[in-house]
């Protein structure tokens, strides 16, 4: 549905987006993660037509954004980090005004506004001044604004920034509901939010694609490292490391228990560049040791995020 190809954008000598390529499928909720200055907002602004790329292209449903920006903008609803609201207006008056600007047919306008108010959870504040609303409710009004022309794609830049945990949960629920019918792309710093909400996560660092995939199983551009944890009894701690050192692909072996007798458990952590579970099991099976625990540790999204975005910092 959306194809971003070799996208590059410079601000003077600073490269904000660096040869970024990305495919986004119809109907998915995509989370765009990265530290401050990673290029997330710039990417979203190019996608929505608010900025022109330095080079590369963005296509939406086969339409090149540079060739026909108006057609692409009509497919997208966009909510920037700071919602563009007229705070001296009532919520209803503001949305009614936006509906007129967006060309909503007069006969359909009231039912459409009621539907948006229900979806975004603002039915009980429609006749309140926007200035009196909490930030959470202002974000909901911004969502209604972004959805006014019933776009196929919803793009949200840090939609939960500055909200309390209850407000974050409410906005998350709204995004998931919207995602049942539309493609949703949003940037966030809250990793738990991405894990709970997104079908797929993309991590950007220094303008480059660093990782992508389901939040619990990211594909990275470098060789994946695995951590295998096991606990054995019936042996001395000093005998464990020599047994496993012969396995191809093992990067390090850590023994956390120096046991006094063979009845005491020995905890072992193995870091490897490939899946060595079968090799480890076969070696243990040849001994008289008792295997008490045996599991492969999965990296959390937070671990992957920090690993990818902090590796170049000293």
Image (cartoon, rainbow, N blue to C red):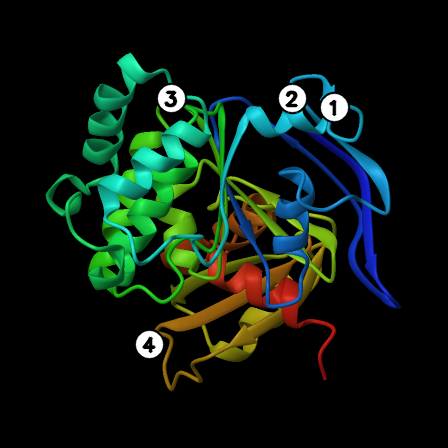
Q: How many marks?
A: 4
The local crowd at label 1, few if under 14, some if 14 to 19, many if 20 or more residues have their Cα within 10 Å, is few
Separation of residues labelled 2 and 1 (CA atoms) = 6 Å
The local crowd at label 4, few if under 14, some if 14 to 19, many if 20 or more residues have their Cα within 10 Å, is some
Secondary element at tag 2 = helix
* Up/down of 213 relative to 137, above or below: above
Separation of residues labelled 4 and 3 (CA atoms) = 57 Å
Q: According to the image, label 1 marks what residue?
A: 68
**Circles 2, 3 touching at the beta carbon (< 8 Å):** no
Separation of residues labelled 2 and 3 (CA atoms) = 20 Å
Secondary element at tag 1 = loop
Separation of residues labelled 1 and 4 (CA atoms) = 71 Å
* Up/down of 221 relative to 205, above or below: above
**Circles 3, 1 touching at the beta carbon (< 8 Å):** no
Q: Position of residue 252 (x, y in %)?
A: 65, 69
Mark nearer the viewer, 4 or 2: 2
**Figure quadrant of residue 163:** bottom left
- Which disc number belongs to residue 181? 3
Separation of residues labelled 4 and 2 (CA atoms) = 70 Å
Q: According to the image, label 2 marks what residue?
A: 71
Q: According to the image, label 4 marks what residue?
A: 264
């Amino acid at each position: 549905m959306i194809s971003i190809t070799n996208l590059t954008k410079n601000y003077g000598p600073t490269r904000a987006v660096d040869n970024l390529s990305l495919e986004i499928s119809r109907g998915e909720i995509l989370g765009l993660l990265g530290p401050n200055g990673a290029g997330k907002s710039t990417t979203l602004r190019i996608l929505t037509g608010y900025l022109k790329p330095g080079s590369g292209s963005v296509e939406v449903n086969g339409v090149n954004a540079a060739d026909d920006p108006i057609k692409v903008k009509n497919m997208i609803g966009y909510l920037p980090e700071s919602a563009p609201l007229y705070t001296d207006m009532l919520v209803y008056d503001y949305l009614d005004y936006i509906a007129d600007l967006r060309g909503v047919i007069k006969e359909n306008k009231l039912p459409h506004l009621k539907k948006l108010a229900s979806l975004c959870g603002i039915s009980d504040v429609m006749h309140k001044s926007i200035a009196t609303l909490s930030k959470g409710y202002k974000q909901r009004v911004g969502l209604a604004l972004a959805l006014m022309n019933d776009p196929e794609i919803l793009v949200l830049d840090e939609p939960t920034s500055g909200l309390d945990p209850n407000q974050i949960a409410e906005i998350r629920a709204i995004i998931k509901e919207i995602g049942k019918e539309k493609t949703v792309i949003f940037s966030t710093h809250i990793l738990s939010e991405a894990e709970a909400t997104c079908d797929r996560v993309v991590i950007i660092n220094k303008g480059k694609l660093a990782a992508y995939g389901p939040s619990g199983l990211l594909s990275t551009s470098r060789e994946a490292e695995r951590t295998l944890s096991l606990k054995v009894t019936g042996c001395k701690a000093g005998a464990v490391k020599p047994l496993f050192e012969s396995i191809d692909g093992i990067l390090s072996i850590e023994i956390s228990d120096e046991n006094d007798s063979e009845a005491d458990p020995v905890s072992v952590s193995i870091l490897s560049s490939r899946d060595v579970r079968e090799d480890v099991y076969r070696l243990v099976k040849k001994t008289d040791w008792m295997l008490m625990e045996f599991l492969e540790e999965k990296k959390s999204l937070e671990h992957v995020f920090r690993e990818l975005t902090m590796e170049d910092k000293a």
